Image (tube, grey):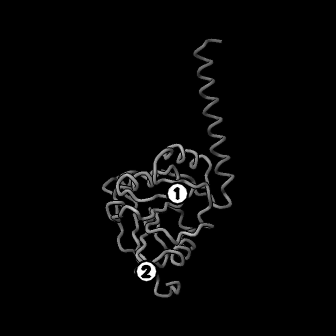
């Protein structure tokens, strides 16, 4: 068999194995993610959100469902905040760990954020599906302290009053970015604060 054919078959086989591993990672976390898959947030959207939500060194920035840790890395680089990310997809978690390895002030946890207390966070970022946003609103409204800010990429928190709705200056990445602040954004009926 010619060498070039061996190389082609090796590359195709490797790609097939990676696709199978990717599919298995999605299946393993399906009970928690309900089918939501890891999707990288465009840097232009992250920059737009970070421009709108100034932070101070020493504040805690938490990204729930942090994927590859891109938002964490950019927030840490720009503001010097302490960053913690939660990710349960094993492939996204491994990528985030690799990309944040050796960087001070950045931590990525392979843990379900629904079971974590987010009460010490000053800023929470998320890119989650609409079917979990009501539950997320209840969790954040109960746990976050006064002055905490929430950045939600693409989907609003039902019942919450946004402080701003931003759009990146990009035709491909122009989905909304919702900015909230505790307690001003909480529904009038909320009794947690």
102 to 126, vertically: above or below? above
The kind of secondary structure element at disc 1 is strand
Q: CA distance from mark 1 to mark 2?
A: 23 Å
Q: How many marks?
A: 2
Q: Residue at x 35, y 57 (%)?
A: 79
Q: Nearer the viewer, residue 169 or 92?
A: 92
Q: Which mark is residue 183?
A: 2
60 sits to left or right of 22:
left
Sequence-first disc among 1 and 2: 1
Q: Residue at x 69, y 52 (%)?
A: 28
**In the rendered image, is residue 154 in sight?**
no
Q: Quadrant of residue 115?
A: bottom right
Q: Residue at x 43, y 80 (%)?
A: 183
Q: Position of residue 91 (x, y in %)?
A: 60, 46
21 sits to left or right of 175:
right
Question: Circle 1 sits on which residue?
Answer: 85
**In the rendered image, is residue 30 in sight?**
yes
161 to 91, vertically: above or below? below
Q: Quadrant of residue 151?
A: bottom left
């Amino acid at each position: 068999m010619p060498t070039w054919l061996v190389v082609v078959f090796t590359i195709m086989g490797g790609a097939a194995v990676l696709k199978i591993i990717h599919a298995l990672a999605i299946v393993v976390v399906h009970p928690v993610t309900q089918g939501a898959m890891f999707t990288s947030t465009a840097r232009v959207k992250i920059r737009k959100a970070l421009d709108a939500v100034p932070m101070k060194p020493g504040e805690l920035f938490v990204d729930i469902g942090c994927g590859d840790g891109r938002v964490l890395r950019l927030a840490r680089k720009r503001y010097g905040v302490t960053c913690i990310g939660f990710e349960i997809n094993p492939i996204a978690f491994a990528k985030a760990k690799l990309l944040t390895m050796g960087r001070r002030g950045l931590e990525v946890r392979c843990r379900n954020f629904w079971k974590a207390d987010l009460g010490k966070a000053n800023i929470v970022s998320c890119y989650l599906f609409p079917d979990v946003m009501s539950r997320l609103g209840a969790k954040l409204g109960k746990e976050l302290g006064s002055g905490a800010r929430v950045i939600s990429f693409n989907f609003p928190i039902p019942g919450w009053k946004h402080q701003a709705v931003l759009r990146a200056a990009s035709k491909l990445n122009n989905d909304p970015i919702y900015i909230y602040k505790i307690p001003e954004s909480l529904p009038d009926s909320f009794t947690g604060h």
